[in-house]
Amino acid sequence: MKKLLIVILILGIAAFVGYKYVYQSHRDIQGEKAEFTVDATELAREFSENSDVTSKKYLNKTIIVEGKLTEIEANSLMLNDAAYCTFDINHNISESSLNSKYAIKGRCIGYDELLEVVKLDQASIIK
């Protein structure tokens, strides 16, 4: 009987810890301080040269990526054809802003080797 209670207690604690891990609160990327500010082309170059080291440096970190606006979609944009930034809501950038300089803050979620672009999510426009 005593062993059964211990097993139930351990399972209860494991279930609680698992629940807290899975349903943890979402990060507020817009409110976080950026750990790095980097040019979009330079960031893509770093990933293409040494993906493992660069992933450890930038992955899941809040960063500011700077570059020239080269592509616009409804809820995403591309800087220097090297950084693909997705927004949670539609941005207010028009087609007339192409080739303008922008700084985008977001969470680095990785490098797409096929398209050779760095991907950011939860992006927001800094300037």
Image (cartoon, rainbow, N blue to C red):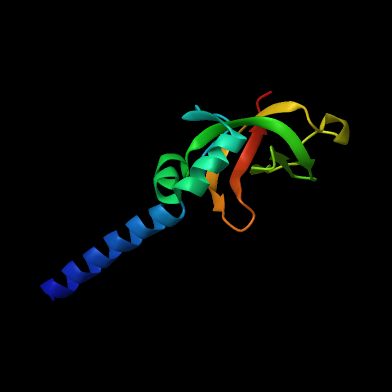
Location of residue 76 by image quarter:
top right
Report x, y in % for residue 92.
Answer: 80, 33
Direction top: furthest residue: 127
Residue 6 falls left or right of residue 11: left
User: Camera-side residue: 93 or 2?
Assistant: 93
Residue 5 falls left or right of residue 45: left
Name the residue located 39 percent from the left edge and 45 percent from the top edge.
53
Name the residue located 44 percent from the left edge and 56 percent from the top edge.
22
Location of residue 74 by image quarter:
top right
Name the residue located 60 percent from the left edge and 47 percent from the top edge.
119
Report x, y in % for residue 79.
Answer: 69, 37
Name the residue located 23 percent from the left edge and 64 percent from the top edge.
10
Residue 65 seen by the camera:
yes
Direction front: furthest residue: 49
* Quarter the C terminus occupies: top right
Report x, y in % for residue 96.
Answer: 88, 31
User: Camera-side residue: 60 or 46?
Assistant: 46
How many marks on residues?
Answer: 0
- Vertical position of residue 10 compared to residue 80: above or below: below
Location of residue 100 by image quarter:
top right
